[in-house]
Image (spheres, rainbow, N blue to C red):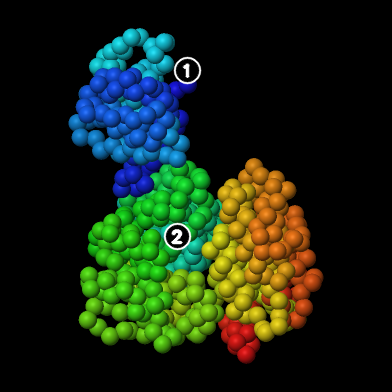
Amino acid sequence: MTSSLVELRVLEGPNLYFPRAAIKLTLDLTGVIEAPEERALRFAARIGLTRARPGKPGSGFRQRFAARAVGRLVRQIAGEAGTTRLAVRVRPTNDVHRLVVAYPWRSRTRAQALGRAVADVLDAVTVPEPVAAPNPDIDGLVSAAAATVRAAEAGPGPTTLRPRIPIVAVTGTNGKTTTSRMVAHIARTHGLHVGWSSTDGIYIDGELVEAGDYSGPSGAGRVLAHPEVQLAVTETARGGILLKGIGLAYNNVSVFTNVSADHLGMHGIDTVDQLAEVKGIVSRITRPDGWAVLNADDPRVLATRAHIKARPWAFSRDPDSPALREVLGDGGRVTTVIDGWLCVIESDSDPDPLIELVDVPMTLAGLSRFNVENALGAASAALAVGLPRAAVVEGLRSFKPDPEHNPGRMNFFTRDDVSVVVDLAHNEAGLEALLEIMNGVRRPGARLLLGLGAVGDRMDDIVESLGEKGARDADVAVIAHKERYLRGRSTDELDELFRRGAARVGVEDLPSYPSELAGLQALVDQAEPGDVVGLMCHEDRAGVYDWLATAGFTPDTPETLRQKVKAAQA
């Protein structure tokens, strides 16, 4: 017989279910959900569930009945084992036969024993009726399960860290890395020793000390292990929250940049609303005396305001946004753009103009709305964590879109009047941002040449949409694959999806290249003076940079970018 326990996962810190360490059980309850209604009612009676309405087998009603029953069963076993007030949360999944059950823990081994004991009872009472005893002794099963839990060793406690220094935690679908780098740069401008964790690795005072993706729970611990660090900036991604929980008990300032379709269909997250809930955990654990910085232009991000304990600090490109008025009315702060100036506003005070957007290189003289938002969020976070105004201004002025300050994010290069832009652009919103900045530096009559790419675990419709957007908005598009990120797909499968999307906008010719570098080289070979080449670069950034240098391309300075923007507007 197959066990009802699909997975038992230990979450070491704040997570989707609780603001502290929790156990997450994924249970297959086919035996309950597909049972005849009479048998489901008998099961409910055995566990003392009154006024039960199980609904038809296999229905959503039956799934919710099972959720209520399992929650009661967990509490019963925990209560008899000595835990009388256990918080239990049960959630349905997109598979009607499966449920997720979560409860907080203080003793790892005993908490895991509880999860296994619950599964054992479910296995015993949900055996198909011809096989099962006529009336399994549910009371005896619960008592035996509770005895097993009581006898288990307590085990170690959670490893959640309580930081000794200020923490700025950054989350969101896009803009996390750029925003966290900007905050760290501003703090270093002020002379602080800064550590930050990101998808690229662990950085201490701008030096990469450990390469790898540290946007999960281990990143903060690696940064805090360096005693010289005075301020930590953590990039916090969806995967780490879902798989291990957040490694910190709290943060002092959080930044929620935005949320859009990305990594859907993975780890039980199937909608953008669910994704927003996951990412919003970072804002929910911000200390009450801290600040939760929220993008007021994103309704899902702004909705997080209803669930935070911290003071709200909203940012928006629109100074007349109703959301900004609400935040100010509640005693919060806002950052916005007025007459081309990045400004901070407090309740009952005039705006404080910090810096003109034309003097913030990352914004392309204000043309890149995504990077305007990143700059607004970074300035808000830096001020919220206590960095002085002058350091914020100087940091925004000196942070550049080049491989030194922001590798892999909106990096511009030039050779013989041909521009190349290298950007991660790993999803639809990222591609939209890349195309926006390419258009921002394209002179009249010049072309956009685009290297498309995607990791293999993207949903089919996402890859098709990338192909459609790229083929529609670029004059020339090719596919540039990421071999190390195919994740079970073949390049032929991805080619088919990209081309299906391109065909929707009438583009039938979409050549495919085995690597990002090969795709870039093919585009540069056909580029003419004034053309702008863009590459969605995730896999081989170092190889792309090396080739660009060898081929005679040089990084653009802020002045070069300003000149390109002016030429594009002529």
- Number of callouts in the render? 2
- Quick check: 455 left or right of 37? right
Q: Front-most of 382 and 29?
A: 29
Q: If the image is split into quadrants, where does the C terminus sit?
A: bottom right
Q: Front-most of 46 and 232?
A: 46
Q: Residue at x 32, y 64 (%)?
A: 292
Q: In the displayed image of the protein, which residue is found farthest to the right?
A: 525
Q: In the displayed image of the protein, which residue is found farthest to the front?
A: 56
Residue 16, percent across and down?
A: 37, 47
Image quarter for residue 69? top left
Q: Residue at x 30, y 79 (%)?
A: 345
Res 259 label: 2
Q: In the displayed image of the protein, which residue is found farthest to the left?
A: 84
Tell me the residue that label 1 is attached to: 1
Crowd around label 1: few <14 · some 14–19 · many ≥20 (10 Å): few
Q: Secondary structure at mark 1?
A: loop
Image quarter for residue 469? bottom right
**Which of the marked residues, 1 or 2, is nearer the chain's N terminus?**
1
Residue 337 visible (yes or no):
yes
Image quarter for residue 437? bottom right
Q: Amino acid at mark 1?
A: Met
Residue 138, percent across and down?
A: 28, 17
- Quick check: 534 left or right of 51? right
Q: Residue at x 62, y 80 (%)?
A: 441
Q: Amino acid at mark 2?
A: Val
- Quick check: 95 left or right of 64? right
Residue 217 visible (yes or no):
no
Residue 351 versus residue 155 in the image, above or below: below
Q: Secondary structure at mark 2?
A: loop
Residue 457, percent across and down?
A: 59, 47
